[in-house]
Amino acid sequence: MNIHMGKNVNFYKKKKKGKFKSSTLHVYLLLIIILCSVILSITIFQLNKKLSLNLDNTMTAYIAIIGSLPTVYLWIVKERKKEEELKNKQQEINQIKVSELNKVYVDAVNQFYNEKTFIAGAYALLALVDDWINMSKEYGEKAKDYYPRVSQISSILFSKQKENCNDDLFNSIIIELLNKIVQLDKNIDSFSFNWSKVSLKNLKLYNFDFRNSQLNGIKIVDSEFINVKMTNISFENATLTNNDFAFEHLDDANLKGTNFSNSIFIGSNLKRATLTSANLFQADLEHAELNDADLIGSDLSSAVLNGAKLINADLSYAKLSYANFEGADLSYAKLSHAKLKDADLSHAKLKDAVLSHTELEGTDLNENKLK
């Protein structure tokens, strides 16, 4: 401990010594500037005399020349001092704000974990998220210190959602927070949120723009997505079971390894989506658009794909047992090594589809169009 204190004292002495040197340097600089001004005045005097420039040859004029450079220098020093004072004042105000927010945080957390004041605490924490975001924008150089506070408070709120999933008021707070953090994560390079720790249930998400968002590993179950724009979204390795995605746009989405079992995709747009090794067991994809989608190794067992469009989709090595493809368009689709045991392909279009090494035991190919 004494060694540590000694280091602090030495640092303080060095700091004071450095400050003294800097101050002395300013004095020397001022003297140099005055000397330069005198030399400049003498030079102008000599040139005026030799070249007959007819310049003002009075003492006042030369005093003005001598005093001009030092005056400019002193003005610059004064302005810099004002800037430094203003910066110090802003830092002081910033520290006061941080101290106040930390106090509010302690009070809000205590309320949040108290059953009687739970909702009040939730609203206070949500407001704190906004405060820290605003602080990050206002003091950009401190953003890297403030954004972790946003993540911390958000994680606290998200952690209580599943056990309070039937509380509509709390769900509205969570939905607002979810959208806020998604937008922040998407638009601010210096902010990154770990969605794999988030587990949500029984939400109704509507009219959000989640395009180009990264929500890898998130867990959202038993929820409804209404008019949520999700083009080019990344839900890689997410758990999204028993959700309603009917008529939603998930084109060009990264859904690799995602669990969509028992989810509804009626009429949804999944064109060019990457669903490699995705779990779509018993999912309802009736009339969904999956043209050019990558479904290699995916599990579509017992899934409903009546009237779905899978033109040029890659279903190689996919599990399609007991799936219903009645009336689906599988033209040019790749089904090599796929397991179609007891699947229903009646009235399906299979023009130029690749069926090499495909397991078709018990598959209904009634009135199937192969050409």
Image: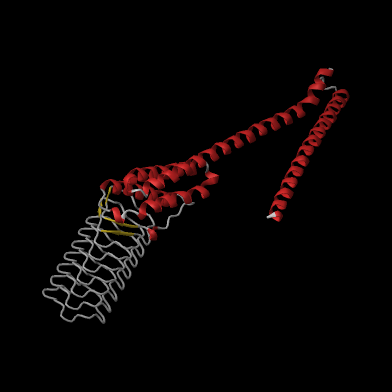
Closest to the observer, 108 or 356: 108
Which residue is at a point 29% across and 53% down the rendered structure image?
164
Q: Is residue 20 above or below residue 342?
A: above
Q: Position of residue 258 (x, y in %)?
A: 32, 65
The reply to whether residue 347 is visible in this rendering is yes
Q: Position of residue 204 (x, y in %)?
A: 25, 51
Q: Is residue 23 above or below residue 281?
A: above
- The picture quadrant where one finds residue 79 is top right
Q: Position of residue 325 (x, y in %)?
A: 17, 69
Q: How is the image coloured?
A: secondary structure
Relative horizontal placement of residue 239, taking residue 33 as reference (left or right): left
- The picture quadrant where one finds residue 250 is bottom left
Q: Is residue 73 above or below residue 56?
A: below
Quadrant placement of the C terminus = bottom left
Closest to the observer, 292 or 235: 235
Which residue is at a point 88% across and 25% down the rendered structure image?
50
